[in-house]
Image (cartoon, rainbow, N blue to C red):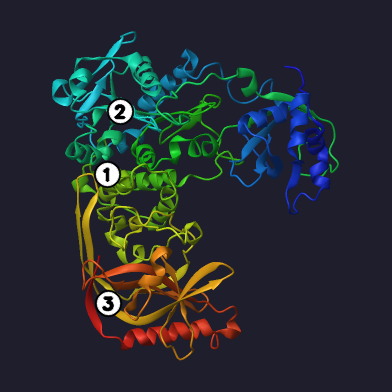
Amino acid sequence: MSEQILCHACQAFLDGAREAANFDGSPPYKHHSSADSLKSALTLGCAICTSLFGAYATLGSTSWARDKPIEQPVVESWVFEFHIDCDDYFPNQILVLEDAAAKSGPCGKPIRGNSGGEDALAFFASQYDVCRTTHTTCPRWAPSSHFFPSRVIDVGCRGDAEVCLRVANTIDAPQPYLTLSHCWGQSQPFTLTNKTVAQLERGIPVVSLPQTFHDAILVTRRLNFRYLWIDSLCIFQDNLDDWHTEAGQMSDIYGNATCCIAATSAKDCNTGLFIDREPHALEPIKIKITESRSLSSTHLPPPGLYWASFRWTNYNAIDHAPLNQRAWVAQERYLSSRVMHFSREVLFWECFERFANEASSNGIPYKGGFHQFLPSISSLKTHVFGMVMGLSPARQAPNAEQVTPALLTPTCQFDYDRWKSFLGVYTQYLMTKEADCLVALSGIAQNIEMVTNDRFVAGLWRGNLLEDLCWQAEKYEIDRDRSSRPTTWRAPSWSWASLNIPLSTNYHWAYVSDTDKAEILDCLVDAEPSGQIKSASITLRCRLIPVAVRIETNEGFDRAFAHIGLRSRSSIEVEIDDWSTAASRTAGTNIWLLVLRDIFLSGDGGLLEGLVIVLSTNRPPSFERIGMFSHVAYPDSKSEVQDHPKLRAYEELLEKYKETEEKVVELV
């Protein structure tokens, strides 16, 4: 392979210009300072910029955000990270340089042609074969080896013109099947209804189905499977009872599937799985570095020939793809033991023991920023699976492949903070139907319930309920002029699911100990089999502190403060859930602080947190949450401990709590 043309910006950087431009300083080193500069590099045919532009498919100013040396088993490599400097968000791209003198070619295999070609699909076939025959942990994720969906699509054999709907009782014994995870998009795909069921059971031409369904059928056949589960074709879309029943079985449907086909890059069901790729644009290129202005630099490679390639990380190619912006897909990916990701440029395989793509079929290296961080869904899944692997049945029956729920005895505690991090991301996902907010989580909830013996109550966990009640909405996502509530009631006021805005994940504090200031007496939830809530309430023994709430506007930003008449004349800032009704809900005197937790922080600090509640407008004398408070008393220095105003207010608030009569209240 001949050496490639590089533009002045790329060559200058690699020859040490970045080192001379204060590598550790801020702002980051500018690679191209304007779109015109990047255009000129593309016109010149700069190999690096052409690859970078192909990865972004957009113009903008680029910066070198970070670079660092890494170590590989065979050859030393350098990793550089690009990002677009503009108002819109674009995921970073990673450039890897490998010493060409150490080997004849770069790490990884070449990527060829269409992503639906024989070579591409052979990658998935080989990955599945390795997983099935050598992986010992992957089979243990499935809830039950005897489960089979109520209905599946019988794809027949390769070359068949039609497929048909089959009911479970017409199939001999549970058979292996695949699932499809996809975006419906704006267009309504052909669906299972009372009018179409007879047609589907007789058989329907493959060519009449949306392209994504057509391609998924092709993949199922090529991998020698016969049955495929597709939500819109296997759940009656005009029968609400059937929908609730089937939606409540997502944990079993995806958890017991042999593999999940993920239409990762498809924005709708008509896009399809397969994409024509330009092999040359995906190949590593050979570049020459002539000199380094700082020979002692460890941040830049020494002069010589290098293989340069943009590696595709799961964070870029999968987590920011169209499919993974949908709320429903979170549980589809979580529940599946194996996933075949059809991303825009490269195919990815994901199971518990391997994350690989076509270029790195033995697994993508974890060093050097390839995995910038585990996405919250993968982090949660890995944590729960670690608990599954530590369950007592594995010791009682070493050869058993499945876990019996009745025998579950976790050997480690469930990490509720990991769940909160996941919710912070989940609540940003897109959802076509507001009512699906908790339904789209029911499969994950069932899985965690099975492992932990905890109980999922309207989006919170019974074993961590006092802390979970203190959730906080992301204040910068709140539109002060528009309601934060869904159009139709879907959750009690004390649940984060009662809002349509993301949750904040920036309110966690490292604490030494905590004391409960309220007691949960009862928690009642009436829900559909799907997980959709019909009614819910919590009964607590607690103390209510009456307050007056004042709303202040500072530089166009509203803030709310609760005044209790403290001797220090301090006020407690509160976070309002729905600012569109803040003025009416906080008017008058019927407002209370419900203190839930007293937390002792390191460094002589303290924190009181709880809810801001009012009498329910629909169910008096019950109460509703309208916000939360988290009063932190953390002095700036040791010398200020005794005189710190927030610490004095914290102590006086505790005194007020002790003076208040204990009572039993119901939250709805």
Residue 520 vertical position relative to residue 28 in the rendered view, above or below: below
Nearer the observer, disc 3 or disc 1?
3
Which residue is the site of mark 2?
230
Find numbered disc 1 in the image and state the secondary structure of the residue it sits on. helix
Image quadrant holding the N terminus, namely top right
Q: Residue 370, relative to residue 107: is it above or below?
A: below
Q: Position of residue 261 (x, y in %)?
A: 38, 27
Task: Check whether the beta carbons of the residues at disc 2 and disc 3 lie within 8 A of each other.
Answer: no
Q: Earlier in the sequence, mark 3 or mark 1?
A: 1
Mark 2 or mark 3: which comes first in sequence?
Answer: 2
Amino acid identity at mark 3: Cys
Q: How many marks?
A: 3
Residue type highlighted by circle 2: Ile
Q: Which residue is mark 1?
A: 395
- Label 1 near label 2: C-beta < 8 Å? no
Look at mark 3 in the image and give the residue it sits on.
542
| Residue occupying the point 27% across, 77% down | 542
Seen from the viewer's position, the closer of residues 33 and 351 is: 33
Above or below, 655 against 58 in this view is below
Q: CA distance from mark 2 to mark 3?
A: 48 Å
Q: Residue furthest left?
A: 169
Q: Is residue 99 visible?
A: no
Q: Tag 2's secondary structure?
A: loop
Q: Residue furthest bottom?
A: 567
